[in-house]
Structures are given as C-alpha cells and as structure tokens.
Amino acid sequence: MVSSYLFLPCVQCFLLIYLVTLSGNLLIISLICLEPRLHTPMYFFLCNLSTLDIVYVSTILPKLMYVCHTGDHVMSYTSCMTQMYLFITFGDTECFLLTSMAFDRYVAICFPLHYSLIMSKWVCVLLLFPAWFMASVNASIITWYVHNLTFIDLVYVKNFFCELKALMNASMRDTTSLNTFITVAAMFVGVTPSCLILLSYIRIIYTVLKIKSLAGRWKTFSSCSSHLTIVVVFYGCGMTLYLSQSLEQEIILSLMFVTLVPMLNPLVYSLRNKDIREAIRRRIDNKITF
C-alpha cells in the first residue's frame, strides 16, 4: 500500500512540534505524579489526557517525519490498518475523556460539599475504563469493515496518513454499510459526548450565575476554563474537518487536528492553571530534577 499524496513541509517543523508535544505532556504527567497536591480526580483525568496525547501524536508524526526525510511513501497494508485503528481509538477516547473531565467540573462546582464522596477513586476508574474500551471496540469494528473492502495492489491514499475517508475513497467496493455504521458510531462517540459536555456547562453556568460577587463567579468558572478551551479546540477542529469539502482543506485540517490539539493541551493547562504553575514553581525553587 502506498500513500503518495503527502503533505511535505519542513521536517524540522514537525520535529519541533513533536518535541514540544512530548516535553509538555511529560511535564504535566511528572508534576501530577510527583506533587501530592495534584492527586485529585481533575488531575487524574488530566494525566490520562496527557498520556493519550503522547500516544496519539506518536501514531502519526514519527512516520510522517520519516516519509518527509527519506521520500519513501510506501507503507505496508498491516501498518496502514494499525495506524488507522490507533488513530480512531485515541481520537474516540479523547471524546469520552473530555466528557469525564466535564462531569468532574460539574460535580466540583454544582456539588462542592459532596465532591470527594461522588468523585471517588473507583468512580474515576469507572469513568476512564469504559472510555478506552468503547473507543477500542468502535475502532476494531471500523478496521474490520475496512479490512473487508477490496483494494488494488498499489493504493494511493490521498492524505498524509492512513485516514479512514481516504481509504474508503480508494476502495473498489461499495462502502454504504461502512458509511451507515460510521454515522451511527458518530452519534454515540461524537454527538452524545458533546451533548453531555454542553449540558454540564449549562448547569455550571447556571450555578456560577447564582454567585453574587463578580470575583466569586470568575474564580469558580476559571477552574474549568482550561478544559473548556481544549473542548472548543478539539471539537472545533473535528467538526471543521468533518464538514470540509476540498481535498486540500481536508489535508490541512487533518494536519492541524493531529498536531495542534496534542501540543495545545499542556500549554493551556500550564499557562492557565494556577495549580500547575505553582507546582512548576515549587519544583524549580526546590531544585528537584524530573
């Protein structure tokens, strides 16, 4: 299988993005593991989000950098299927994980006195495990569908990685059943989590507006501003990519979706989150090496 319509900008640019993404997310993971003050449900989910971003971007960028450096566009069928499966799994998991983080903020703001009781360790695990499981199942079914499509010996994938839509366009068989399943899965994996996040923030805003002081409102809402920023970027890029019409737009938006979101997460949480900034300051003051 060959992917020949690749977007080939500077290798150094991709390397810089990859290193920033890795170092930023590893910093977040290290801080959360080392700082007892960050051993809370909110940072438990953030640690998993950073881990997810590392494996997510590592699915695409190393291979893309290799292709840009060597000019070797060839990828085996097995590698292509594996890359597609991992990309779908990690993308779907992030949808569910962002929903769990929205629920955490909802409980923290709307039920602060019962937060510790509701968001116990077992509840956090029960929110996290189904996210990975359901995403893996959905990716497995889609991969099975694609595996049963018919391709010629040499396939030209019109994207910079083995993207689902590009593979469907390259297929020689009818993809109606696969399109139907993708539509149904999108309702469950994409629309349902986004609706739950929206409902959570509607309830959060309603609770915040009942606070009389403006400073109290801002302080309360600022605790979920980082998460809201990531949600807007993630779903904004995803929806724009889904609605794109031209091939050029689709490639550029796919590149932004693969690189921008994983790189932006640690930057947003480190710059906008007071606890993370204080943890970094304490580590620097104590001269502790990660």
Image: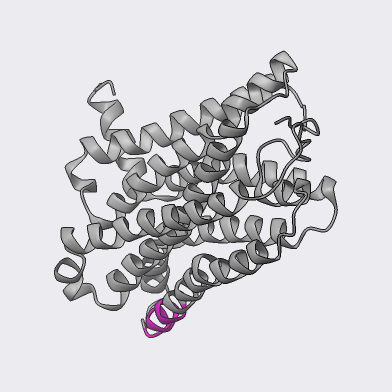
User: Residue 155: x, y in percent?
Assistant: 76, 36
SS assignment for the magenta stretch, majority: helix
Which quadrant would the N terminus be assigned to in this image?
top right
Numbered range of the magenta stretch = 202-210
User: Residue 204: x, y in percent?
Assistant: 40, 77
User: Residue 180: x, y in percent?
Assistant: 64, 69
User: Residue 141: x, y in percent?
Assistant: 50, 56
180 displayed left or right of 229: right
284 displayed left or right of 246: left
Q: Residue at x 40, y 73 (%)?
A: 217
**Which of these two is toward me, 138 or 56?**
138
Q: Residue at x 77, y 27 (%)?
A: 8
**Which of these two is toward me, 119 or 251?**
251
In the figure, 105 relative to 5: above or below?
below
Which quadrant would the C terminus be assigned to in this image?
top left
| Number of disc labels | 0
In the figure, 5 relative to 39: above or below?
above
Q: How is the image coloured?
A: one colour
27 displayed left or right of 173: left
Q: Residue at x 81, y 49 (%)?
A: 249
Task: Specify the farthest residue to the top.
Answer: 70
In the figure, 117 relative to 48: above or below?
below
In the figure, 176 relative to 272: above or below?
below
Q: Is residue 126 magenta?
A: no
Task: Specify the farthest residue to the left.
Answer: 117
